[in-house]
Amino acid sequence: MKAYIKFFILLVLILQSTLSFAQKQKDKENDMPPPLTRILFIFDCSQSMFGRWQSDTKINIAQKLLSNMLDSLKDVQNLELAFRVYGHQKNFPPQDCDDSKLEIPFSKNNLKKIEHKLKSLVPRGTTPIAFSLEKSADDFPPCKDCRNIVILITDGLEECRGDPCAVSQLLQKKGIILKPFIIGIGKNFKESFDCVGTYFDATSEIEFNKALNVVISQALNSTTAQVNLLDEMGKPTETNTNMTFYDNFSGLIKYNFIHTLNNRGIPDTLVIDPLVKYNLVVHTIPPVKKDSITLIPGKHSIIALDAPQGYMKLKLMGGNTISNKNLQCIVRKKGNPETLNVQFFNQTEKYLCGNYDLEVLCLPRLIIKDVEIKQSNTTTIEIPMPGIAVINTVVNGYGSLYVMEDNKMKWLYNLNEGVTLESLILQPGSYRVVFRGKMSAKSISSIDKDFKIESGITTTVNIYRN
């Protein structure tokens, strides 16, 4: 009785420990911080910023509104800022197309430094936008999971024969930055900057202030999505499959998620960066895809894909044996030569609903065509258990294995000339081996050996003259 009580207490302690660990793991997952967002402001301080614009000069209005916006970011978590300026070091003329400098690098709690530098700027030079974008690649310290965002504020177009579009696309292709934001002051430059990034027109002070707020909102607001994997009834019941989100522009992998249904049977909510257009691959067999997915910043999006699935079980008649545990089957879409999967026997695998052709990897090959997979059902394919042929040639040499059909030999396999003992998985039936040793110089030394294979039985075939 005492032993039983001790065992019960021990069991309770183990259960408590397991539940406590599981809860800690769950809390840890829920407490995971969002990725670090890094925003680099590229600010136009070229001579044209002295131009009059509504209530004041462009530079004064831009300094005031940007400074106000920076104040609103002081309590934002997981955010770092940097400040690059062009056109502020050299007078124009002459034109200096290298006039661009990272004034305040990325760090924590550097808002006051940026505001101080912003207020001290005096417009002097030209507009090297492409050069500034190119240099910005080095402004972001290496970071695997950071969101690197560029906000370009300008009142003019490229003046140094650079190509801002090409530079921006190259940086995006390399995954260095996300698609930049551009705010055009005083004039609509949309046609010129659409290829660079997401353009916002600020033809008035009000529009400039609104554009700043929208850009920051899009950069920082949490955006969520759910992926509905639909069954044949159009309901989101399919799950437990990996999903890969690719950047539509660069082709880089952005996220991998194992699809999950929550405790209410609803697809789990994902927090996804809205600044990227995505191509989604759901790794069903075969995979399903959806391209050019655009998310609305700050909104919840539903991404739906048709993915009705059922199961296929491969089974050997009479069960399994240790010697046959590695028997495999190639699965192909009906009428398509491409291999979708190689499935083991006595294994159940999930496939999209449809029809498939099978090729069992025993000798001779067993072809099973037009196997139908139905929604949420298991289709069982059962074949006679193969046998094993252990071919012992005693010496190295040259030989082939044939299956006997209507007194004719059908080639199956060439023996490995470098070994003397081979094990082959064969279907039940009649077979013949023809063999000659390497050291035999006459064809008459060739040996024929007939044998039979029975299900689940290992047959040793000795190839030598009595």
Image: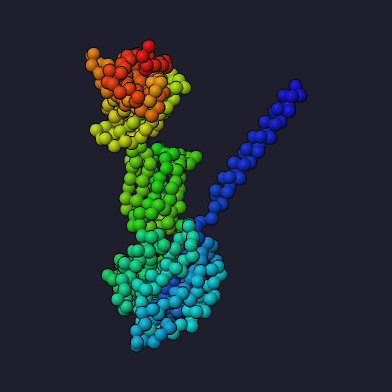
Q: Residue at x 53, y 72 (%)?
A: 111
As drawn, 263 above or below 180: above
Q: Which residue lies most toward the front here?
A: 441
Q: Quadrant of the C terminus?
A: top left
Q: Position of residue 134 (x, y in %)?
A: 38, 70
Q: How many marks?
A: 0
Between 322 and 412, which is closer to the camera in this rendering?
Answer: 412
Q: Residue at x 41, y 21 (%)?
A: 394
Q: Quadrant of the N terminus?
A: top right
* Residue 273 found in image quarter: bottom left
Between 60 and 106, which is closer to the camera in this rendering?
Answer: 106
Q: Residue at x 55, y 68 (%)?
A: 108
Q: Which residue lies most toward the top here?
A: 466
Q: Is residue 379 left or right of residue 111?
A: left
Q: Is residue 14 left or right of residue 144?
A: right
Q: Residue at x 35, y 66 (%)?
A: 168
Q: Is residue 455 left or right of residue 68?
A: left
* Residue 41 found in image quarter: bottom left
- Res. 187 in view: no
- Res. 170 in view: yes
As drawn, 185 above or below 403: below
Q: How is the image coloured?
A: rainbow
Q: Position of residue 32 (x, y in %)?
A: 54, 52
Between 178 and 271, which is closer to the camera in this rendering?
Answer: 178
Q: Position of residue 42 (x, y in %)?
A: 42, 73
Q: Position of residue 443 (x, y in %)?
A: 27, 20
Between 324 and 348, which is closer to the camera in this rendering?
Answer: 324
